[in-house]
């Protein structure tokens, strides 16, 4: 068992919480773009409430522990490790409840280089508990607008976790997929399930557009989010995201292993 104290120490040592690599400037830029309803940062969420920049700063101070002072405009952002632990506890509770019902789940990530292992271990544990880990629409094309223009990617799965790849990337040995904030992959996956007439997920687990895109469509969704990802926390505040865990989402992939152990222990899913 990994205690909350031990995990708290790891969060700080690995800079998953405490002062993190995400800068205050990056976060404030995201809040301004979100306030303007820029789709690059709303991540598929259509907010019901009006969110100005100061509203978002106050929300993120409450949810993540960042500075609530609008005059604080530079330096590293800060995540309160106690809020991360609380979020992981709630995340584990939802996993445990879904596993207890042996329900269908869908997992996907827009951060495959960093978070694929975290989600894949969850998928393995959920599958072992009797859950149906869904892998719909594999191989289907997803057209995503990027800063380089419209790009076509392929929806794929690694150990039960969805991601998108560049066409031909698997053959080229690029196993980790591409980074994306887009909600389009989860929409394509859910459309594939609807077309096939198969079971729909009772829970979607992931980050970025996977969480917000699913939550906007009425599916229960939980996931991880950095301080420059206000959409997940807005979704949580508005009731369309069940759990948003504040954590740096771009550290070394092996630094997330203690989080996996902690969540699986809390969810009674450790093998």
Image (cartoon, helix red, strand yellow):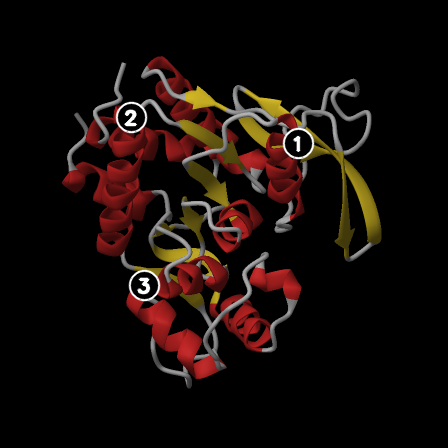
Q: Is residue 227 above or below residue 196?
A: below
Across and down, in percent, residue 258 comes to 31, 31
Residue tagged 3: 63
Across and down, in percent, residue 82 comes to 21, 54
Residue tagged 1: 195
Residue tagged 2: 101
Q: Secondary structure at mark 2?
A: loop
Q: Quadrant of residue 140?
A: top right
First in sequence: mark 3 vs mark 2:
3
For discs 1 and 2, the disc positioned in front in the rendered view: 1
First in sequence: mark 1 vs mark 2:
2
Q: Is residue 141 above or below residue 143?
A: above
Left or right, 29 with reference to 142? left
**What's the residue at 58%, 31% (across, down)?**
162
Q: Mark 1 and mark 3: span between their CA atoms?
A: 37 Å
Across and down, in percent, residue 180 comes to 64, 46
Which numbered circle lies on residue 117?
none
Q: Is residue 67 above or below residue 209?
A: below
Q: Mark 3 and mark 2: span between their CA atoms?
A: 29 Å
Residues packed near mark 2 inside 10 Å, few (<14), some (14 to 19) or many (20 plus): few
**What's the residue at 35%, 16% (across, down)?**
130
First in sequence: mark 1 vs mark 3:
3
Q: Quadrant of residue 29?
A: bottom right
Q: Quadrant of the C terminus?
A: top left
Q: Secondary structure at mark 1?
A: helix
Q: Secondary structure at mark 3?
A: helix
Left or right, 217 with reference to 15? right
**What's the residue at 29%, 48% (across, down)?**
12
Question: Do the residues under discs 3 and 2 have CB atoms within 8 angstroms?
Answer: no
Across and down, in percent, residue 106 comes to 49, 32
């Amino acid at each position: 068992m990994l205690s909350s104290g031990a995990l708290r120490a790891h969060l700080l040592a690995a800079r998953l919480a405490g002062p993190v690599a995400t800068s205050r400037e990056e976060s404030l830029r995201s809040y301004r773009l979100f306030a303007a309803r820029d789709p690059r940062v709303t991540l598929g969420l259509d907010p019901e409430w009006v969110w100005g920049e100061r509203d978002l700063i106050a929300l993120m101070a409450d949810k993540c522990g960042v500075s609530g002072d609008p005059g604080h405009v530079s330096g590293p952002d800060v995540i309160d490790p106690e809020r991360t632990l609380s979020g992981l506890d709630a995340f584990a509770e939802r996993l445990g409840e879904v596993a207890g019902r042996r329900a269908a789940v869908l997992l996907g990530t827009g951060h495959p280089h960093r978070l694929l292992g975290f989600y894949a271990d969850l998928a393995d544990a959920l599958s072992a508990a009797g859950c149906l880990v869904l892998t719909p629409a594999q191989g289907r094309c997803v057209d995503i607008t990027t800063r380089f223009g419209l790009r076509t990617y392929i929806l794929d799965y690694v150990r039960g976790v969805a991601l998108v790849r560049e066409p031909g990337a698997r053959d080229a040995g690029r196993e980790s997929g591409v980074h994306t904030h887009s909600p389009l992959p989860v929409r394509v996956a859910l459309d594939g399930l609807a077309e096939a007439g198969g079971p729909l997920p009772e829970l979607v687990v992931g980050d970025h557009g996977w969480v917000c895109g699913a939550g906007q469509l009425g599916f229960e969704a939980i996931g991880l989010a950095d301080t420059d990802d206000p959409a997940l926390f807005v979704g949580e505040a508005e009731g369309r995201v069940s759990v948003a865990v504040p954590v740096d989402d771009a550290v070394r992939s092996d630094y997330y292993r203690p989080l996996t152990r902690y969540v699986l222990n809390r969810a009674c899913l450790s093998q």
